[in-house]
Image (cartoon, rainbow, N blue to C red):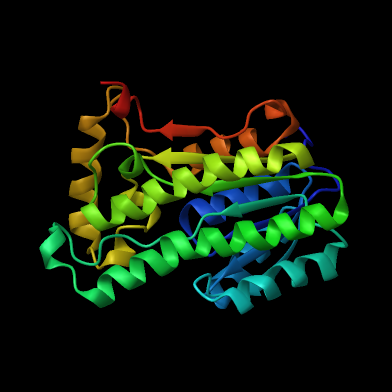
Amino acid sequence: MSGLFVDKSVIVTGAASGVGRATAVRFAGDGARVACADIDVDEAKATVRLIESAGGTAIAVGVDVSREDQVEAMVAAAVEQYARLDVLVNNVGIPTPRLGALLEDHTLDDFNRLVSVNLGGVFFGCKHAVLRFKKQGSGGTIVNTASVAGIVAWGGSVYGATKGAVLQLTRALAIEGAPYGIRVNAICPAGMPATGFMAAGGMDPELSARVETTVAAQHPLGRAVTAEDCAEAILFLASDRAHNITGVAMPVDGGYVAR
C-alpha cells in the first residue's frame, strides 16, 4: 500500500457491503482513519472488524442517507472521533425496485424512494461535507458513486435519472468548491451484480450470476466490474495524485460507454 491517506479522516457511506466495504478497507490499508457508515450497522461493524484485523483504524456509524439529520450526525461523529474530515465517499444507492420495470411501472413511492436515496443522500452528504471543509479551511475531497446509467440508457429510466442528477450535482459543486480547494468527482460503474447491489433490488443469487455473465459480455474488455475495481478508482480520485482533477465522471465499465 502507498500510505497516501496517512492521518486523513474518511467517511464511506454504504460501507456494509460491496463497493463501500471494498473502498473502506482500501482506504484503511493506505493509512486513513475511516468512518464506515451504513443503515445496516451490524454489517458496518463487520467492515470495521475487517479493517482492524489488518491493523487499520475505523468506526461504524449508523445512517439513513435520505435523512438530513442523520447525515449531519454522521459527519459530526467522524469529526468527533478523528478531529477533522478530509474525504467523503457518497456511495449509497438503490436499484430499480423491480427488474425490467418501465417508467410507467414505477409507483410514486418507487420514484420518491429512488430520488430520496440516490440523489437526496448525495445532496445531504455533499452539503454537510462542504460545510465542514469550509470550516476547516483546508479543502477536501468528495467522490460520488454515480453510474453509466447517468450517461446512457441503462438500468431503468427513473434510476438513470437519479444518477444523471448526481453527475450534474458533481459538476456544479466542483465549480462551486474549487475556490475553497474542494474537489468533487464521480465514478460511473456499469453493472455490478456480484457486489450485492442487484440483490438489494430483490434479485436472487442464481439470476444475479446469469446477469453478471451477460453484463461482462457487453463490456469490450469482457470482464464484469467488481467492487475492487470501483474502490481503486475512488481512491485515485480522492488522493493527491488527482490534485488537479475535479468535476469528472469516470466510467468504470470495461469500455461500455466508449462503444
Q: Position of residue 23 (x, y in %)?
A: 59, 49
Q: Quadrant of the N terminus?
A: top right
Q: Is residue 53 visible?
A: no
The residue under the point 70% across, 58% down is: 129
Residue closer to the observer: 191 or 158: 158
- Total numbered badges shown on the rendered structure: 0
The residue under the point 53% across, 48% down is: 144
147 left or right, relative to 153: right
Q: Position of residue 192 (x, y in %)?
A: 34, 47
Residue closer to the observer: 235 or 205: 235
Q: Is residue 72 above or below residue 140?
A: below
Q: Dividing the picture into quarters, in which one does residue 191 lie?
A: top left
Q: Is residue 12 above or below residue 146?
A: below
Q: Quadrant of the C terminus?
A: top left
Q: Position of residue 68 (x, y in %)?
A: 58, 74
Q: Position of residue 36 (x, y in %)?
A: 64, 63
102 left or right, relative to 67: left
The residue under the point 34% across, 24% down is: 255
Residue closer to the observer: 66 or 46: 66
Residue closer to the observer: 91 or 245: 245
The residue under the point 46% across, 44% down is: 168
Q: Is residue 199 visible?
A: yes
